[in-house]
Every structure is written in structure tokens, then in C-alpha cells.
């Protein structure tokens, strides 16, 4: 089967460009094709990969002071210890994992960026063109061939041709997307999609010219 991927000749409008906030790849199948009210019902917490969190740190400083006194019968050394506590606030960067739920199942996500110079595309199958009337093919076929083929036979031939040749058109493009996993955020070690994205970088290195 032959597949043709049609690329847009001009950049797509902003309304057809997606990112991690509007393009989600779920670890499940959904028997639905069409629009969904994602912004109102698919609520994501911690959409940013990391944020600053202020934490209180208590620093304890111990100062030891020694004094010596002399008594009859010998030398006596007395030690006095002083303990001082200081409370300071430090800003630390703690990782925050995007979280959501789908039908009661907890999901954790990872933002996946497209490699440099790459753009992701979403394709839909284009409807097959309507069969042309039999008289329009007489210019490309001999009179004998055209006379020997009626409209039903031509339609059947064209249908078989369309079944072997599919045309896909670009409906949207993206430079990043949110990849979701069950209970744990996807990583290169655990998720096949992220492994495939790593292969793009490896392929670029393999195909570099040796100069």
C-alpha cells in the first residue's frame, strides 16, 4: 500500500499549532474521534517541570568557652558551653511532576520537546476523489479500451487503486507534547515513545558527514 503525506506549503495558523498544554498522549485507547472539551475537564496540576520552593533551615552554632581557676589542693579547669540557634530561609528547586487523572486513574506526565529543526505533524486521511466519468478517460486510453470498459468496471478499478494509495493531509503541527504514564512519569528507560525521540538525535549523529 502506498501512502502520500501532504505537507503544507505555508506555515499553519496559530490556531492549528499545538504544544504540551493542548496536545496530550495518553497511555490508553479512546474510542472517539473528534473534538473534546479538554480545557474544562482534563485539569493538569503542576504543568511546569520544576519550581522554586522556600524551606526553613535551622543552623545550630556551638561556642565553647574555657576558664581556669586555682583552688587550694590543685588546679581545677571549668568548661562553659554556649549554644546558639539561627533560623534561615533558603530557596531550593524541587521537581514537580505534572499530574492529572482520567476516569479515576492517576496519571503523571513528562513534557517532550521536539528535537531542533524538527516539527511534529498530525495527519488525517483525505477522502478519495470521486471517480471521473468514463468519457474523461478517453483522452488517456485508446478508443478500444474505453469502449470495452463500462462505468461500473471503471469505478471498481478506481476503487482498487484508491485502496492501495492513501493520501494524508496535515491538520495540525506541534513542537512539544505532554506524554502521560500510569502512576509514574515516563522516562527514556521505561517509555517507548521517549526512546524513539532519543533515536532521532542518534540518527542525526550517524548521518553526519565525515569531513
Image (cartoon, helix red, strand yellow):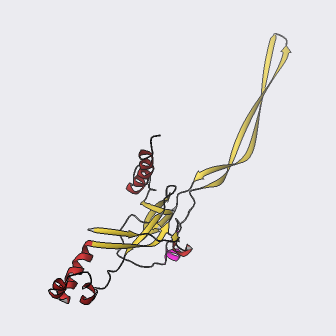
Camera-nearest residue between 31 and 183 = 31
Camera-nearest residue between 23 and 139 = 139
Most extreme residue toward the top is 73
| 105 sits to left or right of 155 | right
Q: Which quarter shows the N terminus?
A: bottom left
Determine if the magenta segment contains residue 39. Answer: yes
Q: Give me the residue at 85% from left, 11% from top.
A: 72
Where is residue 204 drawn, in percent x and y? 44, 49
Residue 31 visible in the shown view: yes
Where is residue 21 drawn, in percent x and y? 53, 67
The picture quadrant where one finds residue 121 is bottom left
Residues drawn in magenta: 37-43
The picture quadrant where one finds residue 107 is bottom left
Determine if the magenta segment contains residue 24. Answer: no
| 51 sits to left or right of 86 | left
Number of numbered discs visible in the structure rendering: 0
Where is residue 117 drawn, in percent x and y? 51, 57
Most extreme residue toward the left is 148
| 35 sits to left or right of 50 | left
Placement of 117 over or under 173, stated as above or below: above
Where is residue 168 drawn, in percent x and y? 37, 72
Q: Give me the residue at 46% from left, 67% from top.
A: 24
Q: Give me the residue at 22% from left, 85% from top.
A: 155
Placement of 196 over or under 20, stated as above or below: above
Residue 188 visible in the shown view: no
Amino acid at each position: 500500500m502506498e501512502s502520500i503525506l501532504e505537507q503544507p506549503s505555508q506555515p499553519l495558523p496559530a490556531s492549528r499549532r499545538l504544544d504540551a498544554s493542548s496536545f496530550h498522549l495518553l497511555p490508553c485507547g479512546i474510542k472517539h474521534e473528534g473534538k473534546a472539551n479538554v480545557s474544562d475537564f482534563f485539569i493538569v496540576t503542576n504543568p511546569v517541570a520544576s519550581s522554586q520552593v522556600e524551606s526553613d533551615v535551622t543552623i545550630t552554632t556551638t561556642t565553647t568557652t574555657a576558664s581556669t581557676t586555682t583552688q587550694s589542693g590543685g588546679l581545677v579547669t571549668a568548661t562553659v558551653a554556649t549554644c546558639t540557634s539561627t533560623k534561615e530561609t533558603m530557596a531550593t528547586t524541587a521537581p514537580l511532576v505534572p499530574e492529572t487523572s482520567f476516569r479515576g486513574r492517576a496519571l503523571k506526565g513528562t513534557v517532550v520537546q521536539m528535537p531542533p529543526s524538527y516539527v511534529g505533524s498530525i495527519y488525517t486521511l483525505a477522502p478519495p476523489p470521486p471517480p471521473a466519468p468514463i468519457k474523461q478517460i478517453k483522452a488517456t486510453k485508446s478508443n478500444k479500451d474505453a469502449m470495452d470498459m463500462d462505468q461500473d468496471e471503471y469505478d471498481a478499478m478506481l476503487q482498487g487503486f484508491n485502496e492501495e494509495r492513501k493520501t494524508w493531509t496535515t491538520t495540525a503541527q506541534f513542537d512539544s507534547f505532554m506524554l502521560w504514564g500510569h502512576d509514574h512519569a515516563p522516562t527514556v528507560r521505561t517509555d517507548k515513545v521517549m526512546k524513539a525521540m532519543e533515536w532521532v538525535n542518534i540518527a542525526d549523529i550517524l548521518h553526519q558527514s565525515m569531513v
